[in-house]
């Protein structure tokens, strides 16, 4: 009897049922190293676990992975449990993971951590060695695979954002055994032969094994020794490599790297237009202010009607002149009055006034004023000064009075003390 053909759906469904009925595959434990890990925006996790001999596709749905106590990533060893089934649309068998736990670190991850720590201690990650990225690069050097999506994304993005920048491509392998040598040589060539302003080093996403060349010491030291700033853009946003830590700037994706190293011409045009408008507005305001000041000046009385202005100033001067004369007169009168008062005071203190009251003062022949009887002797020639003249006299004798005698004399009882 001739066998009848079955459809792909029928065959796949048959195989699926076989797997589902096998009790050994319903709750299986599998040990392996994670590779190609992807945490989808839906919350589901897609990855592969592998060992030296084989690999197994896995999926862990959101309702199963939310309680994990660690973050799965490429290179770590895990033990997963679940059931084996077939994804019919792709015709692939895979493990539907119910739980996952760590089982130590994979060899690649251990190598990554060791090199990372060694280079960090050596200072290759230090901020002081990071070179600034030019704002307006004239030439961008791209080091990547010539056939991958990364080079297309970078070239298209740079050309669209800033066409003034020229792009030089250095084609290299980005995975495999020869990749690290080609990448390091490409960086050295860019420094020696190409006068570039910045280097873009990267590739698209991939498994830890695929992006491993960017985790090697040769590439890390080539980046560190580069005189031209290097922007690392390896893999997807969640991927980190040694190159990211050593480079002068890390971008999450090749497209993002292109956006970081060149300005957006549309944004620049908007900025220039904004500057132009601000400059125009500033100049217009300046012109308006000057025009306003001009109108104020031409409308001032001194300019518009100078004869009236001069007449008003003349009146003001006349008023000030009259006021000055009045103030001057009052000041002079006040000074005259003060002078009269001072003259009266001076006159009241004049010796002539005293002399007019019957007093005299005595001088020697030498013109010395005699203030005491002790200064005179019998036979001395003296001169008495009166208010209306002088008299020359000769001393016949002197009398000495004590203070008591003076007091008694004032009372009318003068006592003669005798002659010298």
Image (spheres, rainbow, N blue to C red):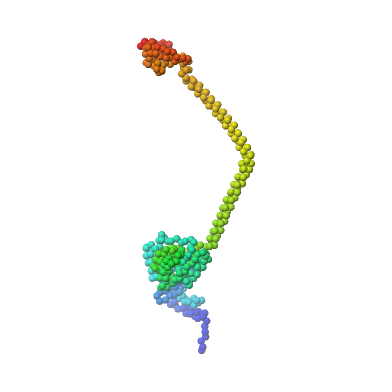
How far across and down, in percent of the image, does residue 5 sit? 52, 84
Q: Which residue occupies 52% across, 25% down? A: 338
How far across and down, in percent of the image, does residue 39 sit? 47, 68
Quadrant, the C terminus: top left
How far across and down, in percent of the image, does residue 59 sit? 47, 72
Q: Which residue occupies 41% across, 61% down? A: 129
Q: Is residue 391 above or below residue 95?
A: above
- Residue nearest the viewer, comparing 401 with 172: 172
Q: Quick check: can you spot residue 243?
A: no
- Residue nearest the viewer, comparing 42 with 327: 327
Left or right position of 420 against 230: left
Number of residue marks: 0
Left or right position of 410 against 335: left
Quarter residue 272 falls in: bottom right
Q: Looking at this view, name the residue that lies furthest to the bottom.
A: 1
- Residue nearest the viewer, comparing 85 with 157: 157
Q: Which residue occupies 38% across, 70% down? A: 107
Q: Quick check: can you spot residue 152?
A: yes
Q: Is residue 388 above or below residue 216?
A: above
Q: Looking at this view, name the residue that lies furthest to the left.
A: 420
How far across and down, in percent of the image, does residue 270 sit? 55, 60
- Residue nearest the viewer, comparing 309 with 179: 309
Q: Is residue 169 above or below residue 355?
A: below
């Amino acid at each position: 009897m001739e066998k009848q053909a079955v459809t792909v759906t029928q065959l796949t469904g048959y195989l699926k049922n076989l797997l589902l009925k096998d009790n050994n595959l319903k709750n299986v434990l599998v040990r392996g190293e994670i590779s190609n890990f992807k945490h989808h925006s839906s919350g589901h996790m897609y990855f592969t676990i592998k060992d030296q001999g084989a690999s197994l596709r896995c999926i862990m749905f959101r309702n199963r992975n939310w309680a994990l106590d660690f973050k799965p990533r490429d290179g770590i060893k895990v033990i997963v449990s679940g059931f084996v089934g077939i994804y019919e649309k792709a015709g692939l068998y895979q493990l539907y993971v119910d739980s996952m736990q760590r089982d130590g670190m994979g060899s690649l991850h251990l190598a990554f951590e060791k090199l990372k720590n060694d280079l960090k201690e050596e200072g290759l990650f230090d901020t002081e060695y990071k070179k600034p990225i030019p704002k307006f690069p004239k030439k961008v050097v791209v080091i990547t695979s010539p056939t991958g999506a990364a080079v297309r994304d970078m070239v298209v993005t740079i050309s669209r954002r800033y066409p003034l920048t020229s792009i030089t491509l250095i084609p290299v392998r980005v995975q495999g055994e020869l990749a690290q040598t080609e990448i390091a040589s490409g960086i050295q060539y860019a420094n020696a032969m190409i006068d570039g302003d910045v280097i873009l080093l990267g590739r698209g996403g991939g498994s830890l094994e695929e992006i491993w060349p960017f985790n090697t010491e040769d590439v890390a030291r080539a980046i560190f020794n580069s005189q031209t700033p290097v922007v690392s853009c390896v893999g997807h946003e969640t991927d980190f490599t040694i190159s990211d830590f050593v480079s002068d700037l890390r971008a999450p994706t090749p497209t993002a790297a292109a956006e970081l190293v060149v300005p957006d011409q549309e944004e620049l045009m908007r900025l220039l237009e904004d500057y132009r408008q601000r400059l125009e507005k500033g100049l217009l305001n300046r012109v308006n202010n000057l025009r306003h000041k001009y109108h104020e000046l031409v409308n001032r009385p001194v300019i518009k009607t100078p004869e009236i202005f001069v007449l008003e100033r003349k009146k003001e001067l006349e008023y000030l002149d009259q006021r000055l004369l009045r103030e001057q007169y009052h000041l002079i009168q006040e000074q005259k009055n003060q002078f009269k008062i001072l003259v009266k005071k001076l006159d009241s203190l004049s010796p002539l006034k005293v002399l007019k009251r019957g007093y005299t003062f005595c001088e020697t022949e030498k013109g010395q004023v005699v203030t005491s009887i002790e200064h005179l002797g019998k036979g001395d020639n003296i001169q008495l000064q009166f208010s209306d003249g002088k008299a020359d006299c000769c001393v016949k004798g002197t009398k000495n009075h004590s203070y008591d005698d003076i007091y008694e004399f004032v009372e009318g009882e003068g006592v003669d003390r005798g002659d010298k």
